[in-house]
Amino acid sequence: MIDATVVELSRMQFALTALYHFLFVPLTLGMTVMLAAMETVYFITGKPIYKEMTQFWGKLFGINFAIGVATGLTMEFEFGTNWSMYSHFVGDVFGTPLAIEGLMAFFLESTFVGLMFFGWDRLSRPAHLAVTYLVALGSNLSALWILVANGFMQDPVGAHFDPDTMRMEFSSFTDLVFSEDAQAKFVHTSIAGFVCAAMFIMGISAYYLLRRQHREFAARSFRMAALVGLVASLAVITLGDALGRADYLLQAPKIAAMEGIWETTKPPYEPWKIVALPDDAAQRDVFSFGLPYVLTPLVTHSFDKPIPGILALENDVKPRIVRGIGAVLALHAYATTKDKAALAAFRQNENDMGYGLLAQRFAPDQDLAKITEADLPKVLDLTARETIPNVFVEFWSFRIMVAFGFAFLAVFAFGAYYSLKNQLERHPFLLRLTTWSIPLPVLATEFGWITAENGRQPWTVFGWLPTFQSASSHALGYMLFSLTGFALLYSSFIAAELYLMFKFARLGPQGRPGHTPTQPGPALAGAPGYADKPWQ
């Protein structure tokens, strides 16, 4: 058994690197698609302004892409250094999509990104457009394979446990790739990237409009981003519902924690809690306020299916824990003696093995064989409670993400409306709000990632491998040193990103402060001559 502090520090380090890296990923995914859309308009219309838009936003994309790659390279190595038991347990299954991501997606993206930047005067317009589309394809294929790997952690399909090798082995590559969790999460995450890119472009364009700089460039960029963002926001909300439905079917503890459901209630009364203060220790809400008759159809897509509460889930899982303890003891016996009777006993309850491993944490001397009849009720109670993720974190990370999502929908809707009516500059409040909203979609994706990963706890592979048994047995000093080093290094990456983004955004599309393709109007809201804009 690994020291609990080392496990927590390992979790903290991976969470730190993942969340830092994920600051750059959604913007990369969305910007490639936005660049492809802008260059497509340039290809069709031949208007130089769209080429200028593609080149300028491509420059900001390049900064984000480079730093995103730098922050992501270390993460795959962490699986081997900090999570060696996990890597041994799922190496064949988990490593395959990551290898495909590198060979198919990342190499495709990184190869053609150079042609996209430096090929404007060396490639024909159709060839350069194709290159831009290949970059967009590569970046989103990269997300696909990474989320296929993550989908296996959430819903381990396409593999079986081999008691001779003590690891998960492939049984179906098709089941792995087309896992319901992986596919729903891929679409939801990719389109969330479109929201991030749209708000990024809108916010910087709004900054130019407020300063009456680059007005034609900013107006066209704002309009395209607002329309893409409006559609993407609607899609993210819709597909988020599909992902929640998958969680209801595959990970009941996650959905119960996400909605703060302590006790199963008779449908369809179950209220959707807008705000609450969950108390994990007491397993109740200090207070809550919700809308009745909303949650049941929202989660189950019906009016008569109950949503299991946390207390019921804890009680229902206890038989699985008992069977899991028996499976682990039989597995130990088979590993020692290769006895066929022990193998048969293991096979009878092998799907519950993970719950036996989870119970090991609460067994006397962490030895399942030492559990007596007197010890068993306490071990079952503690293990059952351990199967529930942190409710407070899950509940509020989900609600913050959802609140942001609906706020973005409103901003995009108003932005698209006033942009299509050529009235943006009459609404400086909306322009300021859009500018200050630039980081919020990225923050929303961070809370979404917390929702997904916290909700999987206490497992690294849901139902099979507990997190506390997955880490490497490092020294405490090593973990503290590496955690501090990563925090400082990744913070420097973010500082470099912000410095370069601010620098080039302020310079504008032509690299000269104040440059504008058209003459600015005399004033903003309602000024005489406001409508004299050549792009109307």
Image (cartoon, rainbow, N blue to C red):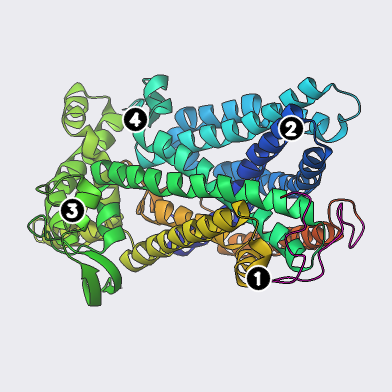
> Between residues 406 and 343, which one lies in front from this camera angle?
406
Residue labelled with disc 2: 110
Is residue 528 covered in magenta? yes
Q: Earlier in the sequence, mark 1 or mark 4?
A: 4
Which residue sits at x=56%, y=37%? 143
Tell me the distance, in whole angstroms, between the alpha carbons under discs 1 and 4: 51 Å
Q: Tell me the amino acid under the disc marked 2.
A: Ser
| Callout 4 secondary element | loop
**Crowding at mark 1 (Cα within 10 Å: few <14, some 14-19, many 20+):** some
Q: Answer whether residue 465 is magenta in the image.
A: no
Q: Say whether residue 487 is visible.
A: no
Q: Amino acid at mark 1?
A: Pro
Q: Earlier in the sequence, mark 2 or mark 4?
A: 2
Mark sitting earlier along the chain (1/2): 2
Disc 4: which residue: 157
How far, Cα to Cα, is label 2 from label 4? 31 Å
- Precedes in sequence: disc 4 or disc 3: 4
Which is more foreground, mark 1 or mark 4? Answer: 1
Asked if residue 194 lies left or right of residue 282, the reply is: right
Residue 430 on image: x %, y %: 60, 67
Q: Which residues are magenta?
A: 512-535
> Is the residue under label 2 in contact with that under label 3 (CB below 8 Å)?
no
Q: Which mark is residue 188?
A: none
Task: Provide residue 426's location: percent of width, then percent of height.
Answer: 65, 68
Specify the amino acid type for callout 4: Val
| Viewer-nearest of discs 1 and 3 | 1
Would you name the residue on which mark 3 appears? 296
Which label sits in the foreground, 1 or 2? Answer: 1
Circles 2 and 4 in contact, beta carbons < 8 Å: no
**Residue, disc 1:** 428
